[in-house]
Image (spheres, rainbow, N blue to C red):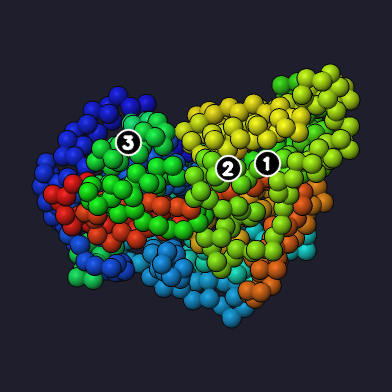
Amino acid sequence: MRRLAGRSAVVLGVLLLAGCGGTATREKWVDKLPLPADTLTMAMAEPGVHGGRFVVGATSSPKTFNPIMSNENSSTDVIQRMFVALTDIDYMTQADIPVLAKSWTISEDGRTVTYTMRRGACFSDGHPITSDDVKFSFDVVMDPVVHPSMQDGLKMEVDGKSVPFTYSAPDSYTFVVTSPMQDALLLSHIANVRVVPRHILEPAFKAGSFAAAYNTATPPESLVTSGAWKLGAYAENEKTVLARNPYWFGVDAKGKRLPYLDEIVFRVAKDQDAASQMFHAGELDGLDNVKTEDYQQFMSEASAKGFTLHDVGPSFNTNFIWFNLHKVREAGNGKKVGSPKVEPWKYALFANRDFRRAVSFAIDREAMIKGPLFGYGIKNWQLLTAGNPRWYDSTVTAADHDPEQAKKLLDGLGLIDRNNDGVREDAQGHDVAFTIIYNGDNKLRAGMATLMQDDLAKVGIKLTPSGIDFNTLIAKTRADQDYDVCLLGLGSAVPADPGMGANFWKSTGPAHYWNMKQPDGKPDTPAEARINEAFQRNVSSMDLAARKAAYHDMSQTLNDEAFLIWLPTLMMKLPVSSRFGNVQPSPMPHRILWNADVLFVKHPDGKH
């Protein structure tokens, strides 16, 4: 998710004349609007003052500003500042907290939640936010044609059928949601739905064009938001500026309207190296995507340059590869329904569990930790990493480095180097060779791909790494499905709980990367049917031990089949200027700006 570029670039140049976090060129903000009847007092470590901006680094622009259609971090990092839900999660305590809803009640059977919404809450254009907007947002999310990824979290398996949540708006300030059966994450699944303005977007929905609404060509003044921030300006591959929503209902303990900052600026660097250079030059206030090889320089310069390198422990982000197992779902372009998207001989390899496991056995993860991770990494075999002590399962196993076992499996499949060129061939003479794509701006993944190329060559497989633009990668893997193998990963859901991953775990999900959006109730493999069943056990139980047992079954089945081949994850350190108050980095995204509405400039004349 990541043109107006010509016009926006000029505006942005003016905005940045004050420098990083500066306030010199703009007047102090004065709140000229009356507070709503129902304000939200935000928790924070210390009260702040208004003014200034926070400039954060990014290596990709948003692909969309549509909170219902966004799927990847470059978009959601920005969007989640602009749109809110009925409730949210406190990143420090993991407790559910009110946002658009000021309170809620849950029925005795645990299936129905009734929300009482805030009176006086408004969108960024001053239009009241009511339950009609919430219902409209749910209508879009549950639409079978639009079918965004979050829809899968609002369905449950009942007697072998996928049954959706039901919802209603009995009056302007009441919203009711009922799940088909008990849901351990009822509030969080509902909170996946960010509220969008019905009065602006309903025409697009009725016209069948909602998926294209709020794209990056939308003029900032036309993009109406429900959160603390609105779009100020956008220049593709340069920067995205968020400005304060003057109607926001959040306040501090003294009753002062939030957010404190005038702006948040996401400045785009071509890659991690360029982003680090920008930070060291004082052009950025924070960076949440740092290469491990740069940690030493950050540590040595922190005091002199006035920033703190926060140690947040094992990243919640994962790295893995998968093989393209997609089949044609609709006939066209000379392909029949059911035929593989890749060449048939490649599909025969990719669909074979022993081949996938052989690839996993060939990979030397210790070398990755010593090499591209510079020692700041740990092995990881599951979606929820060791950074998440509540859910990390140390008993989950997978095929780790054992090249002799890899060769044995490949021999057993009849893949033999028949011409002594170092590359195995199948029975038809095809070289066992394929290309792996990854986002080229990520130096860690580039290093991992290079090491995998060497590892696989040692067992007779030819791997060709190809670093490409992130948006191109998204198009290839999600729309065209025109690729062999992909190296990517997943960030953490909020909250970081397996039940929040329906779009990944369920065979119908749009983030079930190796074979997305399989027909409802008809998974392509028995193993995926077992994962579906285990996921359902996880979300429908209120007993934590039972949920953990189900999560183990989901993870172990995934690994036994090697649908994903896991790679190490990093130990994360995040640099943030010491000039800002209320900075509390988290392993969950956005790791620095999750509490952006309470950040404030406490040292305007500091070095960073």
Judge from the rendering whether residue 249 lies leftward or rightward of residue 173; answer left or right.
Answer: left
Whole-angstrom CA distance, mark 2 to mark 3, is 24 Å
Q: Which mark is residue 368?
A: 2
Residues at marks 1 and 2 touching, judged by CB atoms closer than 8 Å: yes
Residue 505: horizontal and vertical position, in percent?
66, 53
Q: Earlier in the sequence, mark 3 or mark 1?
A: 3
Query: Residue flagged by tag 3: what amino acid is it?
Result: Gln
> For the residue labelled by badge 3, is the local secondary structure a helix, a strand or a loop?
helix
Judge from the rendering whether residue 351 lies leftward or rightward of residue 401; answer left or right.
Answer: right
Q: Which mark is residue 354?
A: none
Query: Residue flagged by tag 1: what amino acid is it?
Result: Ile
Q: Is residue 537 above or below residue 434?
A: below
Residue 194: horizontal and vertical position, in percent?
45, 54
Image point 76% across, 33% down: which residue? 459
Q: Is residue 294 visible?
A: yes
Q: Which mark is residue 363?
A: 1
- Quickly name the residue at label 3: 277
Q: Is residue 372 above or below residue 125?
A: above
Q: In which quarter of the view is residue 222 placed?
A: top left
Q: Is residue 424 above or below residue 534?
A: above
Image point 73% across, 49% down: which residue? 399
Judge from the rendering whether residue 284 lies leftward or rightward of residue 71; answer left or right.
Answer: left
Crowding near the residue tagged with mark 1, few <14, some 14–19, many ≥20 C-alpha atoms within 10 Å: many
